[in-house]
Amino acid sequence: MQNKQKTSNITKIMKILEKHFNYKDRTTLNRMRRPKPNAFKILIACLLSLRAKDETTSKISKNLFKIASTPKQIAKIPVKKLEKIIFSTGHYKKKAQTLKHVSNELIKRFHGKVPNNKQDLLSIKGIGPKTANIVLNFAFNKPVIPVDTHCHKIPNRIGWFKTKTPEQTEKQLEKILPTKYWKEFNGIFVLFGRSICLPVSPFCSKCPIEKYCEKVGLKKSR
């Protein structure tokens, strides 16, 4: 596919998917950006979402924030109590330690505030590139692209580029994706990946962008 045609198709694809996946139907983290985002709550919800279903992330986040919604409040919760609160998110022991550590780091190093730049966020153990970008995008309206497994695999399947890691995908998306879609890309592709473009045996027969997809590496679809 020629570059000019590819750029044109990317815009067409984004317009179609934008219509199909309204932000109101998107993930808990995407919804938390409206109307007034709370950077700390977005950060904590993102840390809880690792390997957890979105419905679980939403429920547990709300339960936790009723008890503690600031770094100081979470830092004061006994570890065992915190583990009990977030138990159903999975990996609860590790997550509890991460939440405590991140909260303490914010208190010690950033006056209890979530940093609004990637370098500072990544300097906190437990915060990786995807989490940092989610916070920057959703909480601070920064022009960055959070890339999770769906955001990494689907563009490769469509045929936009060939990358091996989410970090490589982020760099490629920055080159070819129109900036007006950067803020909504994650929400659109996560929902698209969970409902239609599944990792295994996707619903190609129901896909609104099927005619634009090269189906790279796809062995079986429905």
Image (cartoon, rainbow, N blue to C red):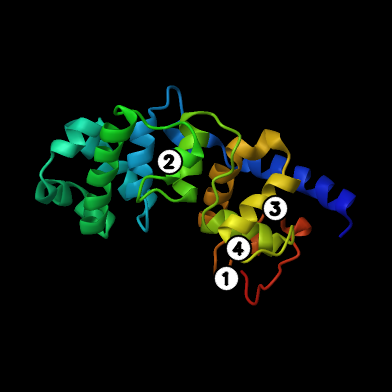
User: For the image shown, how many numbered marks are present on the structure?
Assistant: 4
Residue 202 picture location, percent across and down: 59, 65
- Pick the front one: 99 or 29: 99
Q: Amino acid at mark 2?
A: Leu
- How much space separates mark 2 and mark 4, taking CA atoms? 37 Å
**SS at mark 3 in the image:** helix
Q: Amino acid at mark 4?
A: Phe
- How much space separates mark 4 and mark 3, taking CA atoms? 26 Å
Query: Quadrant of the rendered structure where residue 111 is?
Result: top left
- Pick the front one: 189 or 117: 117
Which residue shows up at 32% across the image and 48% down it? Answer: 48
Q: Amino acid at mark 3?
A: Gln
> Which tag, 1 or 2, sits closer to the chain's start?
2
Q: Is residue 87 left or right of residue 117?
A: left
Label 2 environment density (alpha carbons within 10 Å; few <14, some 14–19, many ≥20): many
Image mark for residue 172: 3
The residue most toward the bottom is 219
Give the residue at mark 4: 203
Give the residue at mark 1: 201
Query: Quadrant of the rendered structure where residue 43 is?
Result: top left
- Pick the front one: 114 or 3: 114
**SS at mark 1 in the image:** loop
Q: Is residue 98 left or right of residue 75?
A: right
Residue 27 picture location, percent across and down: 45, 43
Q: Is residue 212 left or right of residue 165?
A: right
Residue 78 picture location, percent across and down: 10, 44
